[in-house]
Image (cartoon, rainbow, N blue to C red):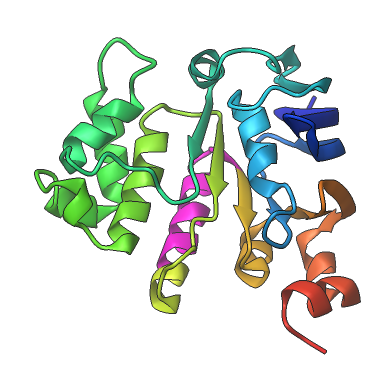
Amino acid sequence: MPMLELNDVNSYYGNIQALKGITLSVDQGEIVCLIGSNGAGKSTTLKTISGLVHPRTGTVTLEGKVISGMPAHEVAGLGVAQSPEGRRIFPRMTVLENLEMGAFTRPAPDPADLDRVFELFPRLKERINQKAGTMSGGEQQMLAMGRALMARPKVLLLDEPSMGLAPMLVDVIFGIIRDINAQGTTVLLVEQNALQALSIANRGYVIQTGKLVLADDAKSLLKNDMVRKAYLGEE
């Protein structure tokens, strides 16, 4: 049984259909990436999983349990954590306060979870009492990911983690995603940087105007002519 599964999901914003029959799965321990151009439906897919958008038809299941239609805080409580596009950290709160917010589904933050986050992101430990809004873009991205990990997720949803970062920092962030996965967290990664995403993923899906048009293992997608032309900038 897949850890996470979407079955024929159709999601709308008002009368506009954003997702058209999306069917995908993520097995336990995998990194699966969803690639596509801006506005293709990548973020809507994550929002539909996390309960921020409710599908009009179709189902989302976590470990076989239907979670579509549940409020977002209940989905989070079951083990789905999202690091959103644009980071969405709390700028006036300190690094520590932001991280503690990530553990809201539990009675109190566990020091062991904080230790794990600081091991993955030593920079955050150095800036533990700094106001989050004064940090660099890369540090804020680390904080958004660390905050999501504080929920001890079964599935970590990452929305455009490389957006706006310098190439050197992109390598660092993707290395950390690999480490998070190696520690046992299943990852669904939405990313416009197709090359980076496919280089760390087990499998990938390509989405265009709300429809999945390709699904394959990551190595095959890297060699696929359509993917190379559309997303890797090759002729």
Instruction: Give me the residue at 53% from left, 13% from top.
Output: 74
Which quadrant of the figure contains the N terminus?
top right
Tell me which corner region of the image, top left, top right, bottom left or bottom right, holds residue 107: top left
- On the image, the x and y values in percent for residue 155 come to 58, 33
Q: How far from the left and from the top, in percent, is residue 134?
A: 17, 56
In front of the other: 119 or 60? 60
Quadrant in the picture for residue 137: bottom left
Image quarter in which the C terminus is found = bottom right
Q: Is residue 3 left or right of residue 187?
A: right
Question: With respect to residue 106, does 224 lie above or below?
Answer: below
**Vertical position of residue 36 compared to residue 235: above or below:** above
Q: Nearer the viewer, residue 143 or 14?
A: 14
> Magenta stretch mostly in which secondary structure?
helix
Which residue is located at x 29 percent, y 27 percent?
101
Residue drawn 82% across and 57% down? Answer: 217
Q: Quadrant of residue 218?
A: bottom right
Measured as percent of width and height from the top left, residue 76 is found at 50, 21
Above/below status of 147 relative to 172: above
Residue 120 shows in this picture: no
Q: x, y percentage for residue 150?
A: 36, 31
Q: Single out the residue that lies furthest toward the bottom.
A: 235
Left-right relation of 57 to 160: right
- Residue 114 left/right relative to 84: left
Q: Which residues are magenta?
A: 172-187
